[in-house]
Amino acid sequence: MSEQQYQKYYVPAQSPWPFVGAVALFLIAVGAGNFVIETTKGKEGFGGWILLAGLVVLFYMLIGWFKNQIDESMSGMHSEQLGRSYRQGMSWFIFSEVMFFAAFFGALFYARVIAVPWLGGASNNAMTAEVLWPGFEAIWPLVKTPDGTTTTAMGWFGLPLANTIILLTSSVTAHFAHVALEENKRGRLKLMLGLTILLGLCFLGLQVEEYVHAYREMGLTLQSGVYGNTFFMLTGFHGLHVTLGTLLLIIMFFRVLKGHFSPQNQFAFQAASWYWHFVDVVWVLLFVFVYIL
Amino acid sequence: MSTVADDLHHDDHHDHKPSGIKRWLYTTNHKDIGTLYLWFAFIMFLIGGAMAMVIRAELFQPGLQIVDPNFFNQMTTVHGLIMVFGAVMPAFTGLANWMVPLMIGAPDMALPRMNNWSFWILPFAFLILLSSLFLEGGGPNFGWTFYAPLSTTYSNDSTALFVFSVHIMGASSIMGAINVIVTIFNMRAPGMTWMKMPLFVWTWLITAFLLIAVMPVLAGAVTMVLTDKFFGTSFFDAAGGGDPVMFQHIFWFFGHPEVYIMILPAFGIISQIVPTFSRKPLFGYSSMVYATTSIALLSFIVWAHHMFTTGMPLFAEMFFMFATMLISVPTGVKVFNWVATMWRGAISFEVPMLFALAFIVLFTLGGFSGLMLAITPVDFQYHDTYFVVAHFHYVLVTGAVFSIMAAVYYWLPKWTGKMYDETLAKWHFWCSLISVNVLFFPMHFVGLAGMPRRIPDYSLQFADFNQWISIGGFAFGLSQFIFLALLLKACRKEGEPVSDKVWDGAEGLEWEIPSPAPYHTFETPPVVK
C-alpha cells in the first residue's frame, strides 16, 4: 500500500452511547433478574419496571448510536478499510449466534441420543431403568416423561411446512433486494425489501398461531419434559431472532426510502441481509431436526 | 452535520486528551480502555482475593469457626467467578487493548465505540453479582461451575441475578474478542504479515476465536439453568427426560476452551519477555504459532476429562484421556522453545524476566499435575480433592496471574514513561514467589491424602498442612499490596524517565514509539520490512 492510496482510518471521538448502553444492559439485567424471581415466586417488586426502563434506555441508545453512525457513513467518513472492519465484525457476531444455537441443538441431540435412551435402560443402565423408572418407554419425540407428564408431538406438515416455505422465499427476496441495490434499481429494491419484511411478519404471525395451538389444543408446553423444552427454546430463540431481523430490515426499508445506500456504500443493508440469511439457515436446521426427524 | 465536523477537527489535535470523568466514561481510545480494563481487573483481583482470605481463615483450623457453611460456599463460588471473569480475563483484554494496536502498527482498535461498551458493561455485571451476596438467602453458592441440580433444584432465588450477570460478562467477552480479531485481521500495518506478528498478537488472535466460539455456549448453559429453575423445564432433570450430566457436558464444552482462554495470552506474554531479556530472537517462532493453534483446536475435544467420575461409557473415558494427554505435546513444544531461547543467551534478571522464569517453572509444574489428573483411573482418586485445587491454582495463579504481572512490569515503563520502583518490584516478586508456593504446594499433599475441596471443615490429620496453606495465603494476599503501592507510584509518574526502547533487548513496533506512548499512535501506519 503506497502512501497516496492510504486513507486515514476513522477513529471516532468520544461517544456517550456505549456508556448509555452499559447502563441500559445493567437495568435490563437487574430488572429481568428480579422480574423472573417476582413472577415465578409470587413476590412483590419493581423488576418489571426496571426491565422496561432498561429497554427504553436501550432503544434511546440504539437510536442515538445508529444516527451517529448513519451521519458518519452518509458524510463519507468511512474508508474501505473501516467497511471491512464492520463486515468482519458482523460475520464474527453471526458466528457467535451460531454457537449460541449450537448449545441448544447440542442439548436436543444429547437428550435424544443419550439421555432418553439411557433412562430407558440403554448402554449399561438396564437395572437403573428397572429400579428408578419401570415402564418408561424411550421414544422420540418423548411424549411421556419418566415422571408421567404426557404431551403430543408437533408434526411437520401444514403450518411448519408453510413457515419453511415462507422463510425460504423471504431469503430469496432478500437476495433479489440486494441484487437490485447492486444494480441501482431502486424500485425493485423497495419492492423486494418490502416483500421480505412482509414474509417475515407472516412467519412470526404463524409462529404465534402455532404456539397458541400447541398450548391450547395439543398440551405441548415449555413444561412438557425435554421434548417441549427443546422445542420451545429452539423455536422461541429462533423467533426472537426473526423478530430482531425483521426490525433491522424495517430500519433498512426506511433508510432506502430516504435514499440511503449505493452499490459502494451499503454495509448496514448487507449486515441486515446476512443476518436474515443466518436466521433462515437456522430455521432449516430446526425444521429438519425439531420437526421432521 | 456540525458534530461530525467537530469530530474531524478533534482528531487533528495530535495529543489532546479530553479531561475529567467523561474522558473515561465516553472514551474510544484503546489506551484509555486498556487502562480501565487493567485497573478493573486489579480491583476485582483484590476483592476476589479478600474472599480467598475468608476461605483460608475458615480453613485455618478444623471445625467451623468464622463463617457458616452457606456463606463459605458463596465465598468459594464468587471467588472463582470473580477471578475467572473479573480478574484474569479482563486483565488479558486490557493488555490486548493496550498492546495489540501498538504491536501491529494500528491507530486504534478496529471498533473503538464497541470497545468502550464491552468494557463498561463489566463493572455493572459484577455489581449485580456482588450485590446478590447481600440478598435474602445470599448469593450464588453452587461453585463457579454451577452444576445442576445445585444451581437449579437446590439454589436460592438470587440465581436469576447470577444468570443475567453472566450473560453480560459473556456479551462483554464476545464484543472484546470480536474487536481483537477484527483489529488483527484488518488493521495490521503494511508489511506486517501473519508470520511476522509478535506472538502476543498471535496468541490473542486464537484466544479471541475461542472466546467467540464458547462464550455463547456458556450463555446457553446459564439460560437452561434459568428456565429449569424458574420456568419448569427439565433439561437437567431426569424426571422430565433430561439429564444432570448433560449440564456438565454443555458447561465443560465451554469450560475447557475457557481454560485455554486464560492461558494462551500468557504464553504470548512469556514469548515476548523471554527473548527480550535473553537478548536472542525467540527459538522456534513458527512452531510456537502451530503449537498455539493445536492447543486451541484440541481444547474442543477434551472437555469430558472434567467428568471422569460422573458416569460415561468406557470408550468416552478412554477417548477423553488420550485426547487430553495429546495437549502436553504442543505445550511441551512451548516450554522447550522458551528454554531453548534462553540457552546461551545473555540473560539479565529484571523483574519481568523473574516473573517469566517463575512462570515457566511453576506453570510446568501445574502442567504435570494436569497430566496426572488426565489419567482416568487415578483421577478417580484425585477428583474433587485439594489436588485439583492445587493443580488449577498452579496454572492460574503462578501461570496466568504471574504472566499478567510480568506483562505489567514489562510494559509499564512504556505506558507511563517512567521506570517502576525496582526495590518494591523485587520485594513483590520474591514475597509472591515464596508465599504462593507455601500456599499451593501443600495442597497437593492434602489432596492426595483425600481432603475434599469446597468443604468448610476437614479431618484432623490435615490440620498442620492447612495452617501452612493459610499462612501462605495470607502472605500472598499481603504481598499484593506491595504491587498496589508500586502501581500507585507509577500512576503518579514517579521514577526515572526511560528511553523509547526501555529494555535493551526489546524488539517490536511498540518500542519504536516514544515513552510514554502518546495518546494517539500510528495514525499513519508504519511500514514493516
Image (tube, rainbow, N blue to C red):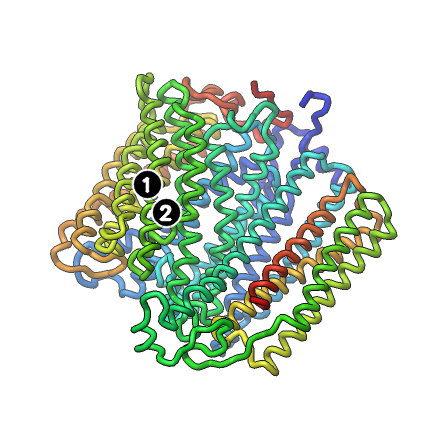
Q: Which residue is depicted at the point 43% across and 44% down? A: B261
Q: Which residue is depicted at the point 72% across and 33% down? A: B9
In the depicted structure, whether residue B100 falls above or below residue A184: above
Lower sequence index among marks 2 and 1: 2
Q: What residue type is labelled 1?
A: Gln
Secondary element at tag 1: helix
Q: Are marks 2 and 1 in contact (CB under 8 Å)?
A: yes
Q: Which residue is depicted at the point 52% across and 37% down? A: B97
Q: Nearer the viewer, residue B349 or A190?
A: A190
The location of residue B290, given as percent across then percent down, is 44, 33
User: The C terminus of chain B appears in which quarter of the rendering?
Assistant: top right
Q: Which of A160 and B192 is in front in this view?
A: A160
Q: What residue type is labelled 2?
A: Leu
Q: Mark 2 points at which residue?
A: B46
Specify the subunit that label 1 lies on. Answer: B
Evaluate whether residue B386 shows in this view.
no
**CA separation, marks 2 and 1?**
8 Å
Specify the subunit that label 2 lies on. Answer: B
Q: Name the residue under label 1.
A: B480
Q: Is residue A196 left or right of residue B164?
A: right
